[in-house]
Amino acid sequence: MAVLAAIAGQKLLETGWRAVDGTEPPLSPATKDATWAESLLWGVVTGAILGVLSVLSRQAVRTAQSRWT
């Protein structure tokens, strides 16, 4: 469940970045088109969102398990 949430979250983040910034997200700091600020912002936002999604998906699994046992 956490893996599916991470994949969905990553796709959502990439789509959101394109919609807001109009450019491709800086998936690697080595990309010559990305500034350090963009790369750091991408890393912080990605880490925060995927961390929250991971916690939420684990909590959903625990809740479902407690209902079924």
Image (tube, rainbow, N blue to C red):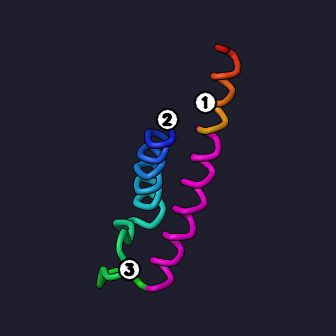
Estimate the spatial distance between the alpha carbons at disc 1 and disc 3, rounded to whole Å.
34 Å
> What kind of element bears circle 1?
helix
Q: Is residue 24 left or right of residue 51?
A: left
- Point out the stretch of residues depicted in magenta: 36-57
Please name the residue that numbered disc 1 is placed on: 61
Estimate the spatial distance between the alpha carbons at disc 2 and disc 3, rounded to whole Å.
29 Å
In the displayed structure, would residue 39 be above or below residue 8? below
Residue 1's mark?
2
**Residue 38 location (% of width, % of height):** 47, 78
**Residue 7 location (% of width, % of height):** 41, 46
Choose between 47 and 35: the one closer to the eye: 47
Q: Amino acid at mark 1?
A: Val
Q: Residue at x 47, y 47 (%)?
A: 6
Q: Residue at x 41, y 56 (%)?
A: 14
Q: What is the crowding at mark 1: few (fewer than 14 residues within 10 Å), some, or many (at least 20)?
A: few
Please name the residue that numbered disc 3 is placed on: 29
Q: What is the crowding at mark 2: few (fewer than 14 residues within 10 Å), some, or many (at least 20)?
A: few
* Residue that protrudes farthest toward the top in the picture: 68
Instruction: Answer whether labels 1 and 2 touch (C-beta < 8 Å).
Output: yes
> What kind of element bears circle 2?
loop
**Residue 37 location (% of width, % of height):** 50, 83
Q: Amino acid at mark 3?
A: Pro
> What kind of element bears circle 3?
loop
Choose between 45 and 65: the one closer to the eye: 65
**Residue 17 location (% of width, % of height):** 45, 61
Q: Residue at x 69, y 26 (%)?
A: 63
In the displayed structure, would residue 52 be above or below residue 23? above
Choose between 3 and 68: the one closer to the eye: 68
Asked if the magenta segment contains residue 53, the reply would be: yes
Q: Residue at x 36, y 68 (%)?
A: 27
The number of discs equals 3
